[in-house]
Amino acid sequence: MYSRIIESELLRLKHIFNVVTVTGPRQSGKTTLCKMVFPNYHYINLEDETTISELELNKKSFIERYSSGLIIDEVQRMPDILSAVQVVVDENPQSSIVLTGSNNLLLSQKVSQSLAGRTAVVTLLPFSIGELTEKDRIFDEFEMMFRGFYPVVWAQNKPATDVYRQYYNTYIQRDIFQVMNIRRLNEFRKFLVISASRIGCEFNAQSIANELGVSLPTIQDWMNVLEATYVAFRINPFYRNIGKRLVKTPKFYFYDVGLVCYLLGIKTAQQLETHPLRGQIFENMVIGELVKHQFNHGMDNNLFFYRDKGQHEVDVIIDDGLQDLKAYEIKLSPIVHADFYKNLNYFKSLFEKETKITQIINTGAISIDDPFTGHINFKDLDSALTAKDN
């Protein structure tokens, strides 16, 4: 059994709110997490037609029966149940209900309409490296990138290619059609592959539209769908009143690099070792770890990147506000070279008072030289960030 870092945050919020909503991609472990944290709660799954039939007779009565401890799984399958949850919670201040859902767009709209002020929302992503066992972490960076981080790959030791093929065919297409009826499916498949091939790059939607022969609004809609179904996310450029010198186009990354490898046709970890996009895939994996850290500890996704027209670029800026910036460069290298710090030093020269940390994240040993230099091994990232947060 793998424990999840977000457990403590989930328990903390449950003492404050009558309802906690757990979102995240399918197969990220939401059901397992909720059952493990709340073992005595009554559990229902809205993928089950029998359960749906029973609920349709009288939703409020059913929820009242178990309101002292109830888990409702895949709530986006019956969004109108949220109105009944609202009524029960308002009438019974002792109610304790946990909702899960894997469609961010539909779920967030319904939750904001029915449960505003009554629920906390947490996002559970696939395993972080910090959640893997020491035995798991024996695998090198290429094996980790190829396998990705979905629990079924690690907990059940299933072949990564088979898992991501089924994930793509079964879940992505179903969720995508639930959000939007995409008619040009062949073009959409090509769009996924193109997006995977451009991780870590500025996302030029017009260029992709021209390449696929579709409109710019179509590409923008498709990217919104990928975000809503927890396939991809964007990182925006960092600004501090010098906007004229900065690029303004976001970068897009995938929540899981195992899916990236599948979309790019990478069939083994050995093949990935010589793949031309291996550096970008490693960058995606590290940025995914940073996003997981933020969500697992109840923080917002406050990640940015820096790039100006003079080609100065920093991979990740974490903006914690109150003059607290952390800047990181990501390198697929066990050795740290002095020139790795060039752009970090440039960024720090611009924002000297605000920048608290500048570090390299790479595949070498952790460095504890001082808080402004050094490097972090990607496998130690969560523990290193947690120490800094505290």
Image: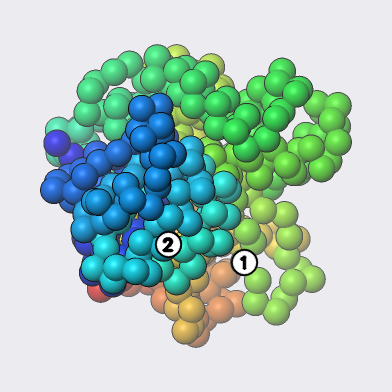
Q: Is residue 354 visible?
A: yes
Q: How is the image coloured?
A: rainbow
Dot 2, how many residues are within 10 Å of its Cα: few (below 14), some (14-19), or many (20+)?
many
Quadrant occupied by the N terminus: top left
Answer few, some or many: residues within 10 Å of disc 1's Cα (few below 14, many 20 plus, some between 14 and 19): many
Q: Secondary structure at mark 2?
A: helix
State the image quarter where residue 58 is shown: top left
Tag 1 residue:
238
Residue ID for mark 2: 86
What is the quadrant of the C terminus in the image?
Answer: bottom left
Between residues 204 and 82, which one lies in front from this camera angle? 82
Q: Above or below — where is 285 with respect to 156?
A: below
Looking at the rendered structure, the kind of residue marked 1 is: Phe
Whole-percent x and y of residue 217? 82, 42
Q: Pinpoint residue 89: horizontal percent, then vertical percent.
A: 35, 65
Expressed as whole percent of the image width and height from the top left, the position of residue 223 reads 67, 41
Q: Hey, which quadrant is residue 201 in on the image?
A: top right
Q: Is residue 373 visible?
A: no
The image shows residue 115, relative to residue 361, as above or below, that is: below
Residue at (29% x, 68% y) in the render:
92
Side of 367 where 246 appears, left or right? right
Circle 2: residue type = Gln
* Towards the viewer: 337 or 331: 331
Q: In x, y percent, where is residue 332?
A: 43, 40
Q: Specify whether 375 is left or right of 284.
A: left
The reply, left or right, for residue 383 in relation to residue 179 is left
Residue displayed at 71% across by 28% down? 182
Residue in view at x 86 percent, y 27 percent:
213
Vertical relation: 360 (above or below) 226: below
Q: Earlier in the sequence, mark 1 or mark 2?
A: 2
From the image, state whether disc 1 or disc 2 is nearer to you. 2
Measured Cα–Cα span from mark 1 to mark 2:
39 Å
